[in-house]
Image: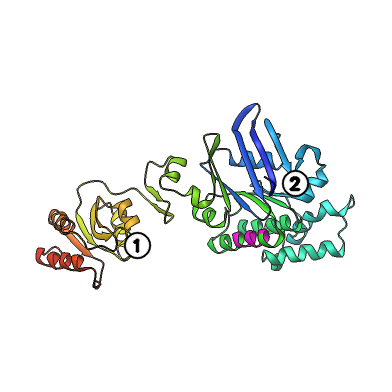
Amino acid sequence: MNRSYFFTTELCVGYERTPIVKNVTIAVGRGEILTLIGPNGAGKSTLLKSIAGQLKPMGGVICLDEQELTQLSREQCARQMSVLLTERLRAELLTCEQVVETGRYPYTGRFGILSSRDHEVVREAMELVRVSELGNRLFTQISDGQKQRVLLARAIAQEPELLILDEPTSYLDIRYKLEFLSILQQLCKCKKMAVILSLHELELARRVSDQMLCIREGRAYRFGTPEEIFRPGTVAELFDITTGSYDEQTDGLELAAPQGEPQVFVIGGDGSGREVYRTLQRRGIPFVTGILYENDLDAPVAHALAAEVVEAEAFEPVPDACLERAKALMDACQTVICTRKHFGSFEQANSELYAYAQTTGKLDA
């Protein structure tokens, strides 16, 4: 634990003597990003509010740089820790630049007068988050996504060593989600800032996090690196997924497969079949597909949506049994769709399957 900047031990948090999350241990090193993931209502926001000092923990100790949070003054906490939670800021008469300037109040003294150094920090924070052009606009007259970026600039202007964020990308489009999280990574690397945040976007959480904490049913379900967290079945169990599927290897999220007897056989492969699979799913048409190698780009979507996948071992000749099974499934279908324009030299089996499809008269032109 010597490397840790932030550490909580056996923390229990909740409201009005009702525990929401019990016995959670967290360690975050300087320059690291820890992301909380889990279902709605699992207690992620409650945990973040308790870490931030907005809720009193029901048990346990919170330490900032080896000092207990309760032993620090409000000014000391504000200089070490910045918080961006989901509550909307009331700033009816403030410009965006003035909102960012409030991040300097822990340094200004009782009169709140900004020095030239404070103004320079504010300017740099707004440039970093790309909101400089909003400086003179009223905070209430910009979009939710722009507000979120301005609030991040305010948090950065506070020059904290620990930054806490609750669903910070909720109001951002995909461009600004990527920019926002890239900025966090840059801050961690350049300023050795520790970051604790919650995210719903699992694919983004996986890419930005150094460590992840899964919260489920009021407890720490799993803690580790993204590679340790995203193992087959983890996400389905964490979120209790019973309809549709999530593939941890590809971050693939698919709706439920069509039910009933297969009507269509799809000859796919090399990633060419995925959109056809999804089109059939949207239309509620059950289908089968093959012959796919187990490492094919189509394979994850095929396994999620197809009634059956005829699959062969990668880098090995396709067994005759696979070809015969594919022909039998094709015979039972009404239509054949081929998503390929040509087959490679090691795809003799699919070439034969396509030739067989031509003889059936079922091939969709």
The residues tagged by marks 1 and 2 sit, at their Cα atoms, a distance apart of: 46 Å
Where does label 2 land, which residue?
65
Q: Specify the farthest residue to the front.
A: 2
Main SS of residues in magenta: helix
Q: Specify the farthest residue to the top.
A: 17
User: How far across and how far down the image is residue 324, in percent?
Assistant: 14, 57
Q: Is residue 56 left or right of residue 175?
A: right
Where does label 1 land, which residue?
297
Q: Secondary structure at mark 2?
A: loop
User: How far across and how far down the image is residue 104, in percent?
Assistant: 80, 56
The relative height of residue 248 versus residue 273 in the rendered view (above or below) is above
The three-letter amino acid code for the residue at tag 2 is Asp
Asked whether 136 falls inside the magenta stretch, the response is no
Q: Is residue 60 visible?
A: yes
- The C terminus: image quadrant: bottom left
Disc nearest the viewer among 1 and 2: 2
User: How far across and how far down the image is residue 353, in percent?
Assistant: 16, 64
Q: Nearer the viewer, residue 180 or 309?
A: 309
Q: Secondary structure at mark 1?
A: loop
What is the crowding at mark 1: few (fewer than 14 residues within 10 Å), some, or many (at least 20)?
some
Q: Is residue 213 left or right of residue 277?
A: right
The relative height of residue 55 versus residue 115 in the rendered view (above or below) is above
Magenta stretch bounds: 181-188
Q: Looking at the image, which residue is at 82% across and 64% down?
A: 119
Residue 190 occupies quadrant: bottom right
The three-letter amino acid code for the residue at tag 1 is Leu
